[in-house]
Image (spheres, rainbow, N blue to C red):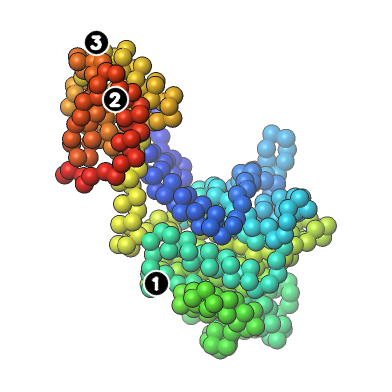
Amino acid sequence: MGSNFQPLPGFRDFPPRERQVSRYLFEAWTAVARRYGFSEYEAPLLESAELYLKKSGGQLSDQLFRFEDKGGRDVVLRPELTASLARIAAAQQREYQKPLKWFEIGRCFRYEKPQRGRSREFYQFNADILGESSPSADAELIALSIDVMRELGFKEGEFYVRLSDREAWLAFCEDRGISASEVDAFLQVVDRIERESERKLGELLEPFSITLESVVSFIAEASKEPSPNLAAVLADLANRDLDRFIQVDLSIVRGLAYYTGVVFEVFDPGKALRSVAGGGRYDSLISIVTDGSSDLPATGYAMGDCVIMELLNETPGPLAQYQSWLQRQSTCDIYVVIADESQRPAALKLVSNLREAGLSADYPLAAFKISKQFKAADQTLARFAFVVGSEFPELKLRNLNSRTEESIAPNTNPVEVLRARLDEPDGPLIA
């Protein structure tokens, strides 16, 4: 019966091959974050439900994995990281120089319908800047979002960033008599403008006494004449030669209620997928989380693994870059082939010496034919194999890529020989 068990809907197993994809993303995310001067932090997977109900808005409150723990506490598996970050930053910000530039890569959970590019458990990369209110902080994160895509192999034309401003929408609401308590609900309708029919959108806008035509007209006009906030961000990005990746589009509002200013989302050109990544300014969240006892301006960015993995697999350049990276990954530096089973004790000693020297080494745990051992060695992607045979203490060192072999004399240190060979450029792979 146990063999029939499958992961719960929306959850995934990560056997080694699938885990390689995650590691590829993690390495790219971390590399860009480090280049931009961000420091890594970590937050708990389990948080107080109140933290995420305080200012989540939209559908998020209905998508929580929420339950009562054994201590009677109302808790949730974190659906995203911003509220957790706000809690940590509020408590720790006096210990750090401003602005805080922090990033995290971790699991998040949302109880929503599993579909292409969306699951109930996912990895998310977050990068946030706290303690800086100028547009330069917004531009910094948008630049980071562009460089994440380029780090993954995407070129100009294979993605773009849609840029918007929540403040412009707040002004729109005030001009048309939409009360502060109704703003979040109204923006939820705007957020669906590309996913719903005109008839459905008209019905959703009726309670606000707003026509779809007026919303569409505002989006077109405001996108042509960027607000001062957007103009400042665009100027900053132009100085970096990154404005070529940007489209001003006021239809982007982001689904969470805590956003207060500039917001952005990354898309594929055909919009075949939901947004690949996104973020924006959330200046009031820390004050809300701490009931006003602490306050920091803040802006953030996040990318989940599900959508970007879909896009990576569909885009030739990034896919080729990933496959090239994958070919360079090895389970170990050296595989020790035991050609003569009577020499297994000597082989185990060799493996131990290699590992103690800081090299990664693997070997057959049971007696196998030599051909099967070399097949196992190939699967590790190790460049070399030591062959321990009847002629021991003489060893053979085989280059598994070029299929060449050399003898290692008994009075030679095999660890030092291997180190030297690993430092040499390798020859072409033999098909």
Query: Marks 2 and 3: CB-CB under 8 Å?
Result: no
Q: Do the residues bearing badges 1 and 2 touch, measured as CB atoms within 8 Å?
A: no
Q: Earlier in the sequence, mark 3 or mark 1?
A: 1
Residue 398 rendering spot, x and y as whole percentages: 22, 31
Please give the label number shown on residue 342.
3
Query: Between tags 1 and 2, which lies in front?
Result: 2
Determine whether 78 is above or below 391 in the image: below
Residue 336 — which label?
A: 2
Residue 249 in sight here: no
Query: Left of 315 or right of it: where is 247?
Result: right
Q: Residues within 10 Å of mark 1 (few under 14, many from 20)?
A: few
Q: Quadrant of the C terminus?
A: top left
Residue type at mark 3?
A: Ser
Give the SS element for disc 2: strand
Q: Nearer the viewer, residue 312 or 250?
A: 312
| C-alpha separation, residue under disc 3 versus residue under disc 1 | 60 Å
Q: Quadrant of residue 151?
A: bottom left
Local SS, label 1: loop
Instruction: Residue type at mark 2: give it.
Output: Val
Q: Amino acid at mark 1?
A: Glu
Horizontally, residue 325 falls left or right of residue 197, namely left
Report the Cα–Cα distance between label 2 and label 3.
Answer: 14 Å
Determine the CA span between mark 1 and mark 2: 46 Å
Residue 156's mark? 1
SS category of the residue bearing label 3: helix
Q: Quadrant of the N terminus?
A: top left
Residue drawn at 21 percent across, 25 percent down: 407
